[in-house]
Amino acid sequence: MVETIRAAVQTGPRQIEIREFPRPAIGPDDGLLRVEANGICGSDIEIYRGHMGMTSQPFVPGHEPVGIIEELGERAAERWGVSVGDRVALEVIVPCRSCADCLVGRYQSCRRRRHSHGVTGIDDAPAVVGGFAEHLYLDPNAVMHRIDNSLPIDIAAMYNPLGAGVRWAVDLGGVGMGDTLVVLGAGQRGIAAVIAAKAAGARQVVITGLEADRHKLEVARELGADHTVVVDGPDAQDVVEVVAGLTGGRMADVALDLTPMAAGPVTDALNVVRHGGRVVLAGLKGGRELPINTDLIINKALSVQGAFGVDAAANAKAISLLESGQFDLARMHTHTFGLDQVAEAIETLAGERGDSAAIHVTVEPHR
């Protein structure tokens, strides 16, 4: 048994180095995960750039880890309902499980959380808790989900983006049988929202993207999108006009904004839905204050919902969808990197490496 664990440590904006940590001693209440893969999302890019989530100390990034349980305490096995050799996916937050919010099911609001995967400083974490590592410590309060061991790891690693699609479009947006959904933003979570909406029975799904996103829009079509809209360049279309034409002026039931840093799509989301429609905002804007037409919200009787992360219910639904094989999710996975290539992996998803094809990117620490 190896006595050390290799992990990628972020020491500052765009600064990542490989370090070795002691392998934690596992007791009756905790465990150790052999990380198979960790997906990368847009927030990883902003954390890497230093725009959000940075602590005052070095930390091990990676908040979408999936892997095999290698060590497990007896009480932990009973509590989690898992065994050594099982594949599990972890949620970001490690809640306290005993505060008022946790006790009523609002564990994502826990103010006494011990730590969070991928953002906690190495001095504050009990051991390595970020996913860009060979092994990851399983805290007694970790929230985990079983995933079929036979599922290709590239597919299993999509549990978080697909969970976001389920939660944001279906659970929060309320997309159901016969509805029309407009997804603003064609990244992995935008495509995941298309998949989730179609699985929930949506009649019509429209997704927008930039000229540079045409390959992503094509994948979205292959996975269920009924219409794609390019919003810039020589063939730019106005998504509000497009949806008005597609619905005979009735407009969409739900709009989901996933665009990073951009203000315009928020206004588009408000305009593209019908009277009494629902708007879900999930695209972070870097702390900028955006002008919002509140009269539009009032006069159209809109419901506007902020989306924070993915909860246990959405993760469970997403994993069931992954395991069902209903959608050809391999079309979404584009790049795999090793532990020594974390910076390259993040920069590839960000489009900084001259490769615009990236949709779903993973780091496999044992590659």
Image (cartoon, rainbow, N blue to C red):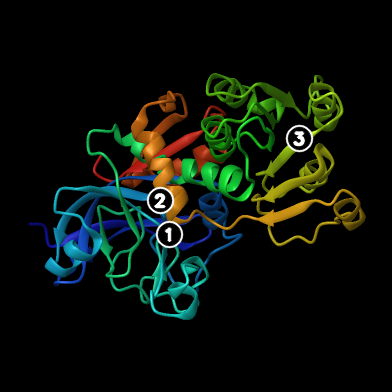
Mark 2 burial class by Cα count in 10 Å: few <14, some 14-19, many 20+: many
* Image-based side of 12 in relation to 287, left or right: left
CA distance separating discs 3 and 2: 32 Å
Disc 3 designates what residue?
A: 252
Left or right: residue 57 versus residue 131 is right
Q: Residue at x 38, y 41 (%)?
A: 319
Q: Is residue 209 above or below residue 280?
A: above
Query: What number is the disc on residue 221?
Result: none
Label 2: element kind:
loop
In the displayed structure, 288 sits above or below 335; it is: below
Q: Nearer the viewer, residue 99 or 362?
A: 99
The amino acid at mark 3 is Ala
Q: CA distance from mark 1 to mark 2?
A: 7 Å
Sequence order check: which comes first, mark 3 or mark 1? 1
The residue under label 2 is 64
Among the two numbered marks 1 and 2 on one chain, the one whose residue lies closer to the N terminus: 2
Is 27 left, or right, of 238 in this rendering?
Answer: left
Whether residue 277 sits left or right of residue 320 in the image: it is right
Q: Which residue is mark 1?
A: 92
Q: Relative to 298, say whether 219 is above or below.
A: above
Residue at image location 59% in from the left, 21% down from the top:
221
